Image (cartoon, rainbow, N blue to C red):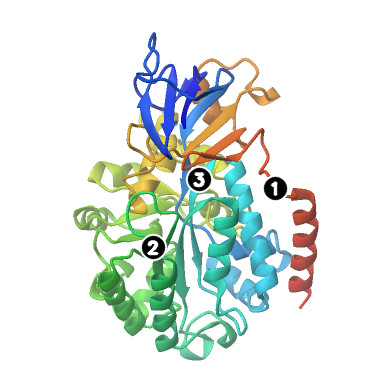
Amino acid sequence: MRLWIRDPLAILAEDAERGVVVEDGRIAELVPAGREPAAPVDSVFDAGAHVILPGLINTHHHFYQTLTRALPAALDRELFPWLQALYPVWARLDPEALRSAVTVAMAELLLSGCTTTSDHHYVFPDGLEHAIDIEVEVARSLGLRAMLTRGSMNLSVRDGGLPPDSVVQDEDEILADSERLIAAHHQPGDGAMIQIALAPCSPFSVTGSLMRRTAELAGRHDVRLHTHLAETEDENRFCVEKFGCRPLDYLEECGWLGPRTWLAHGIHFDPSEIGRLARAGTAVTHCPCSNQTLASGHCPVHGMERAGMSVGLGVDGSASNDGSNLMQEVRAAFLLQRLHYGVTAISHRDALRWATAGSAACLGRPDLGVIAPGQQADLALFALDELRFAGHGDPLAALVLCGAHRADYVMVGGAWRVRQGAIPGLDLPTLIRSHQALAARMQAG
C-alpha cells in the first residue's frame, strides 16, 4: 500500500511541502511544492491541520520509576540522598508493578510523539529476574520501537556503594542474563523493533570487573553500551577518591570509550574531556528536566556539538522528571540551552534535531530520525488546535515555543499507533487507576 500523507501545515524536511509517501514501512518519496507523487497512491491522509516531525527518539529513561513520582521522602534532595530515599521503595518492585510501569511510560511517550525509546533498567530484586522480557512484551503490544538496556548493579551498601543488598546481583549472573537477552530479543540492522544494549548503572554501583567484562561482551555481540556518567560533582569526587581518577578516565580504563557507547547526562565534563569524547565517537544524552529537578547542573550541549559530538534527548526517570513526555523535554532543552548560550546560538530547530537525528545517532540508528526516502516511516503529527497555539506564525516554531505536549497521530514503521490523540485498544482510565493502586501499595511497604 502506498499512502500519501498530503499537504501538511508544515513538515521538518526539505522539499516535502506537499507531504510524504509511505510504502512498506518506509518513506518512499517526498513530494515537493507544486508536484504530485511520482507513482499512483492507494490512499491519502489529509494532513492540512498537522505539523509533521520525524518520530521523536527517547535515549534515556527508567520506566519503573513511574511508580514513584513526586515521592515525599525524595523531594528536595540532591542525587545521592535522593537515591538513598528511593532504593528501599524500588526494592519492592514485582512483575505486576513493573508491567504497569512500563505500560504507563511507553503510553505517555507514544502520546507525546515518541516512536523509539530506550530504557535503563538496573533494579532486579528477587522475583524480577525477567524484567527486560516484560519490557519486550509491552513494547511489542504497543508497537513502539525500543532499545532495552540490561542494566546492572553489583556494588551494594556493604561494598561501599549506594544500593541496598536486595537489588544487586552477582557479576556472573548479570553477564549470563545479558547474553541470554541478546540471543532472545536483539534484532540487528535497519527496521529493528527491539534491540538490547548493556548498561551497568554507574561507577558508584558496579565493580570495575563488571564494567570491563560488559564491554567485552558487547564487543563480541556488536551491541551498544550505556551508563550514567558525569551527572554530579559528587560522582566526580567519588571516582577520584575510589579510583584515583575522574569518571571519563575510569570509563576509558574499563574499555568503554568508543563509538559503541552513549552516556546519560554528561554535565561535568571539562573541555578537554569533551574533545576526547568527540574523537572517540561517544555520544551523550541530555536530560534537561531531570537535571533541573535535581539541580545537577547544565549539560554543555552547544560545546559538545561544536566539538563534533552527537547529542540526543532523554526524559530520564519519572522519579526525577517527573514525566515521560518527550515533546515537553524538547521545549525544556531549548529553553535551558538558550539561557546558557544565547538567542542566536540555539533555535527551535536545534531542539527538534536533538530529539530526532541526534537521538538516532546515540542509539546507532541511521535509519531513524529524519524524514527522507528510504528511512523508516516513523512520524509524529501534531495539530495546532489548542488554545496555547492560537495566534501562532511559524508552525514548527510553535510546537516548541508554545509548548506542544500531545501528538494527534503517531506512525511507527508505517502503522498508525496513535489516532486522534489516543492509543487504539488501550484503556487509559483503567490503566491509570490500577497503576495508582500499585504505586500506593509499593510506597506503603
172 sits left or right of 99 in the view: left
**Quadrant of the frame with the C terminus:** bottom right
N-terminal-most mark, 2 or 1: 2
Secondary structure beneath dot 3 equals strand
N-terminal-most mark, 2 or 3: 3
Where does label 1 land, which residue?
Answer: 425
Discs 3, 1 touching: Cβ within 8 Å: no
Pick the front one: 373 or 252: 373
Image position of 90 with respect to 376: above or below: below
Compute the Cα span from label 3 to label 1. 17 Å
Discs 2, 1 touching: Cβ within 8 Å: no
Discs 2, 3 touching: Cβ within 8 Å: no
Query: Based on the displayed image, in which of its 4 quarters is residue 163 positioned?
Result: bottom right
Residue 61 badge: none
Where does label 3 land, which residue?
Answer: 115
Q: How many callouts does the rendering have?
A: 3
Percent of width and height locating residue 276 = 21, 58
Image position of 310 with respect to 65: above or below: above
N-terminal-most mark, 3 or 1: 3
Residue 230 badge: 2
State whether residue 188 appears in this view. Answer: yes
Pick the front one: 224 or 142: 142
Secondary structure beneath dot 1 equals loop
Query: Based on the displayed image, in which of its 4 quarters is residue 67 positioned?
Result: bottom right
Q: Amino acid at mark 3?
A: Thr
Residue under the image location 47 percent in, 79 percent down: 153
Residue under the image location 24 percent in, 62 percent down: 258
Query: Based on the displayed image, in which of its 4 quarters is residue 23 positioned?
Result: top left
304 sits left or right of 413 in the view: left
Q: Residues within 10 Å of mark 3 (few under 14, many from 20)?
A: many
Percent of width and height locating residue 4 = 47, 24
